[in-house]
Image: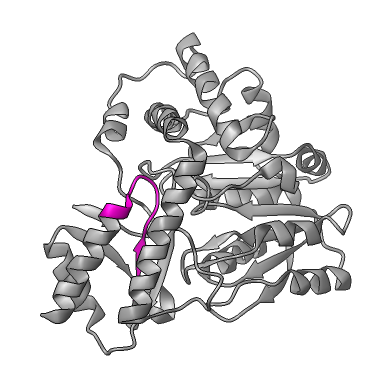
Amino acid sequence: MKIFLPGPTDVRPSIRNEMARPPVGHRSGEFRALHREIQGPLRRLLGVERPVYLVTSSATGVMEAAIRNCVRRRSLHLICGAFGERWCEIAVANGKETRTVRVEPGKAIQPSQVREALKGDEIDAVALVHNETSTGVINPLREIAAVVREFPGVLLLVDAVSSLGAVPIPVADLRIDVCLAGVQKALALPPGASVCAVSEDALERAKTVPHRGLYFDFFQYEENAARDEAPFTPSIPHLYALRQQLKDIEAEGLERRYQRHAEMAHHVQKWARSRFDLLPEPGVESPTVTAVKDTRGADVGKLRQALREKGKVVASGYGPFKKTGFRIGHMGDLTLEDVQELTRDIDELLEG
C-alpha cells in the first residue's frame, strides 16, 4: 500500500529496517555517539548552530512545550485552519490569554494582519502554523517573521510539521525562536517523535515563566543535549531511522529535495485544477499537500475506497470539507513518478 496522506507519509523499507536495530542504553556511549551523528545534519537542515532537541512525542506535545516555556501571559495565534486553531486551544488549556488573527479556509495569513494585531496588545509570542494541512495552504513565513521582529520582546513560534524537509526554513536567519516538526511528514519516518530548534531568546524567556512542567521543560533538553543525551527515555528506534534519513537527505542534496517537492506539487495541483478545483486560493498552495475541492459531484468516499483497492491511500477533506473534497500528500520520499501514477489511477476511476 502506497500512502499519499498529509501525514503520516510513506516510509521506505530501508528506513523501517533501521528501526529494527537492537536497542542501546540511553545513558551509554553508543547513544551519545548516535545523538552526535544526528545533530550535524539536523542543524544544517534547520540552519542553526545550537543543539536541536530530539523529543519522544508527537508535535502536538512540542506545541504545548512552546506555550509553556515561552508565554508568560498572552499569545497571538495566526489561524488559517484546524492546526492553527489547535495551537490556540493548547494555550487556553494552559491558562494563557489568547488573541487571534483568523482568515477564511483557503486563504493565507497576511503580514499586515500580524502587524496590526501586534500593535493592539502586549503579546509574549506569536504562534504560526507554517503549512496548514487541513486546507492545503502555506503561509508567508519570511514576511511574517520580518513583521514579528519589528516588535522587540515578541517571540516567534513556528509549527513546521509538514514543511521541514520540503522547503528551506533557515531558522537562525529568520530569527525563529521555536521551530518544531514531527518526523512523520516531509522527513518520512514513522510517527512518534519530533525535533525542535530553540533560540537563546526563547531560553531567556523560559527563565521568567513559572510552572513550565517537567517533561517539556526546555532546560531539561538543553542541559542534556550539551552531553549528547536525552532527558527522558527516548525512542531510540526513531533516532536510528532519523540518522539514516538525514544521511539520505544530504546524499540527495537539499536543493534537489526541495525541487522534487515543488515538481510533485506542481503536477498534482495542475491536475487537480483540470479535474476539480483547489481549496486554496492561487499563490498560497502548499508544497506538500493538495486540498482538492470537488466541483463535479463525485462520491469522494467511493473514490477513495476504489483507490485503496488499487493500493493507494489519499485522505478525506478535513472537518467541514470531509465530504466535499479530498487531500493528496506529496512529501517525504515520494517521487514525481509516484504522484503521476496516482493521478492516472484517479483519472481511470473518474472515466469509469
Q: Position of residue 191 (x, y in %)?
A: 39, 45
Q: On the image, which quarter does residue 16 sit in?
A: top left
How many dots with numbers? 0
Q: Is residue 347 left or right of residue 256?
A: left
- When the figure is inspected, residue 115 is found, relative to residue 58, above or below; the finding is below
Determine the image quadrant of residue 17. Answer: top left
Would you say residue 334 sits in the magenta stretch? yes
Q: Residue at image x 21%, y 71%?
A: 346
Horizontal side of 30 relative to 316 (left or right) equals: right
Up the image or down, 23 lies above or below 263; here it is above
Considering every residue shown, the one lying at the far top of the view is 29
| Quadrant where the image shows the C terminus | bottom left
Answer yes or no: is residue 35 visible. yes
The colouring scheme, among rainbow, by chain, secondary structure or one colour, is one colour
Where is residue 123 shown, x and y percent of the image?
A: 82, 62
Q: Nearer the viewer, residue 352 or 189?
A: 352
Q: Residue at x 35, y 75 (%)?
A: 272
* Residue at image coords 51%, 52%: 161
* Rendered view: 214 above or below 118: above
Task: State the image coordinates of residue 329 (x, y, percent, origin top left).
Answer: 37, 60
Q: Nearer the viewer, residue 52 or 270?
A: 270
Position in image of residue 108 (x %, y %): 61, 72
Q: Is residue 126 visible?
A: no
Give the residue displayed 38% in from the left and 44% down from the top.
188
Q: Is residue 94 magenta?
A: no
Image: 167 above or below 232 = below
Q: Which residues, given as a range, are shown in magenta?
A: 326-337
